């Protein structure tokens, strides 16, 4: 869903490859520069095929020089936003809104545990550097598949020293969330950004520790599920529609393109606005949201169409509360 409000323009000043598939973009806004607090995002207007769309990217670093920086991971099965960003060269014009403070960092806490998985390092890096500058007590656990997938690792090592733990799955490493939480001061906060599996594990470990839910803050990106991303079919008997969802498009985008009136906001599996009731499913629903509880996901009564998919097969849904 495109928002016309507060659209601003900018010029792409430069790009730098941080890893083989993570590229840093330096964006020079036209007009006033609004300083972004840690955890802020820019919503960038991209083109997916022949139509415009929005993609939300975490802002990297303090941006003290008046430039916004974002880091974009090129995803082979993405809906096309990352491929569009990677097609840009310096001098390109951009349209955006923001900064939006959607993953706010609390200040003045006695202790912080930050956990990042993959490209989830972008807001966490910004939080870690801001907290270190402020003299806060923190630890950062940064997990990636391979050493070559780590972005900002050198800088983080320099700033954090022994307060940084790097875990790579290629060497058999795993993030010990329970131990990290146990070492956190009683009023400390946990900030997590990573794939859905990491967030679910963090939620479980936090819950098991008996700590207050509001002291766990997280953000996800809806690109990772339990199953591979494959095409599937959506049937809507109420509207007499059968819609193919290709590998590189979300169910929400496919429904909108077919003319189904949808409601959405975050498009990251967090707010639940895009959820629709499931009437039947032939295949397995790959719930990729953090909105529904484990019990709700197991019941397969609804799914968040912006991120969740079907692992092959057909899903039949209802749109009773929407207009076709
Ligand atoms: S739009 Fe927020 S969960 Fe889908």
Image (cartoon, rainbow, N blue to C red):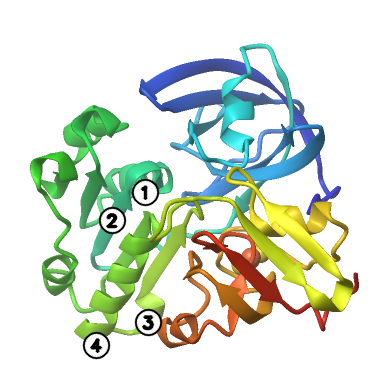
* Residue denoted by label 2: 115
Q: Quadrant of the C terminus?
A: bottom right
The image position of residue 162, as x and y in percent, is: 9, 44
CB under 8 Å between discs 2 and 3: no
The quadrant of the picture showing ligand 1 is bottom right
Residue 267 placement: quadrant: bottom right
Q: Residue at x 70, y 76 (%)?
A: 317
Cβ of mark 3 under 8 Å from ligand 1: the answer is: no
Q: Is residue 54 left or right of residue 247?
A: right
* Residue denoted by label 1: 124
The image position of residue 322, as x and y in percent, is: 84, 76
Marks 3 and 4, how far apart in space? 8 Å
Q: Quadrant of the N terminus?
A: bottom right
* Residue denoted by label 4: 210
Determine if residue 57 is in view: yes
Instruction: Examine the rendered structure and indicate whether residue 78 appears above or below residue 85.
Output: below
């Amino acid at each position: 869903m495109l928002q016309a409000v507060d659209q601003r323009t900018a010029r792409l000043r430069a790009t730098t490859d941080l890893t083989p598939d993570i590229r840093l973009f330096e964006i020079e806004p036209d007009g006033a520069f609004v300083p972004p607090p840690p955890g802020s995002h820019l919503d960038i207007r991209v083109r997916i095929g022949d139509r415009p769309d929005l993609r939300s990217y975490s802002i990297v670093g303090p941006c003290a020089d008046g430039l916004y920086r974002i880091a974009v991971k090129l995803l082979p099965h993405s809906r096309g936003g990352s491929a569009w960003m990677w097609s840009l060269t310096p001098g390109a014009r951009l349209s955006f809104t923001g900064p939006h403070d959607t993953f706010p960092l609390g200040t003045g806490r006695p202790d912080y545990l930050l956990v990042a998985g993959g490209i989830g390092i972008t807001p966490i890096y910004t939080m870690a550097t801001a907290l270190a500058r402020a003299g806060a007590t923190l630890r950062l656990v940064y997990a990636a598949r391979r050493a070559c997938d780590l972005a900002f690792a050198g800088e983080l090592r320099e700033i954090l020293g022994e307060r940084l733990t790097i875990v790579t799955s290629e060497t058999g490493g795993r993030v010990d969330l329970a131990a990290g939480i146990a070492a956190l001061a009683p009023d400390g906060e946990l900030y997590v950004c990573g794939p859905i599996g990491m967030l679910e594990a963090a939620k479980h470990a936090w819950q098991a520790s008996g700590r207050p839910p509001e002291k766990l803050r997280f953000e996800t990106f809806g690109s990772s599920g339990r199953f591979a991303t494959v095409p599937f079919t959506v049937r809507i008997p109420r509207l007499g529609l059968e819609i193919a969802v290709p590998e590189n498009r979300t169910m929400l985008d496919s429904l909108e393109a077919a003319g189904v009136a949808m409601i959405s906001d975050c498009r990251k599996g967090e707010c639940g606005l895009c959820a629709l009731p499931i009437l039947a499913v032939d295949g397995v629903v790959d719930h990729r949201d953090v909105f529904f509880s484990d019990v709700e996901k197991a019941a397969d009564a609804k799914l968040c169409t912006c991120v969740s998919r079907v692992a092959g097969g057909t899903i039949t849904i209802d749109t009773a509360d929407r207009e076709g």
